[in-house]
Amino acid sequence: MDTLLIFIWIWGAMIAMSFWEAYVEGRNAWSKRKYGWRIDLGGDFVFPAYHFYLFVIMWPLLLTLPFIMFGWDLHLFGVMISAYASGTIIEDFLWYVVNPKVKLREFWTEFSDYYPWFTVNGKKIVPLGYILGILIAITAWLALWR
């Protein structure tokens, strides 16, 4: 198994997704002007149905296809989790880079208040979801495929 190729493949798909999502959403990031239900995460934060079906249903179904075809492999499962968790960070950040209607500098402004941030003295440092993604990727690496 070529671990690097798996990461490149999944990250490549996430990069492609950042383009189509940016072009579909424009300035309507996250749950702005989306139809369907939402999961209230507390405060002003919600998890829209659109992202639930994309990140909790579609991506895991696609990434588990090799297990359906070839059987279970714990090492591959760990690699997939790490690539997926880190890939979601790449996809989200690149949304700001490739979006024709949003400027990269808006990433650190109130425009991105649709998800919680780690802040220092009121200054946005990194979205908490990025920290979670990195922790999941590292944990999967340590526990399943290092």
Image (spheres, rainbow, N blue to C red):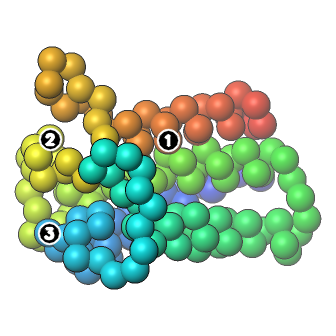
Upstream in the sequence, badge 1 or badge 3?
Answer: 3
The disc labelled 2 sits on which kind of residue?
Trp
Crowding at dot 1, Cα within 10 Å, few <14 / some 14-19 / many 20+, comes out as many
Q: Mark 3 points at which residue?
A: 27
- Residue 108's disc is 2
Q: Mark 1 points at which residue?
A: 133
Instruction: Name which of mark 2 and mark 3 comes first in the sequence.
Output: 3
Residue at 20%, 48% (x, y): give it.
Answer: 113
Residue 14 appears in view: no
* Drawn side of residue 105 relative to residue 115, left or right: left
Q: Is mark 1 on a helix, strand or loop?
A: helix
**Residue 97 placement, left or right of 115:** left
Please, what secondary structure does the residue beneath circle 2 have? helix
User: What separation in Å lies between label 1 and label 3 (alpha carbons)?
Assistant: 24 Å
Which residue is more in the foreground, 79 or 102? 102
Front position in the image: 135 or 34? 34
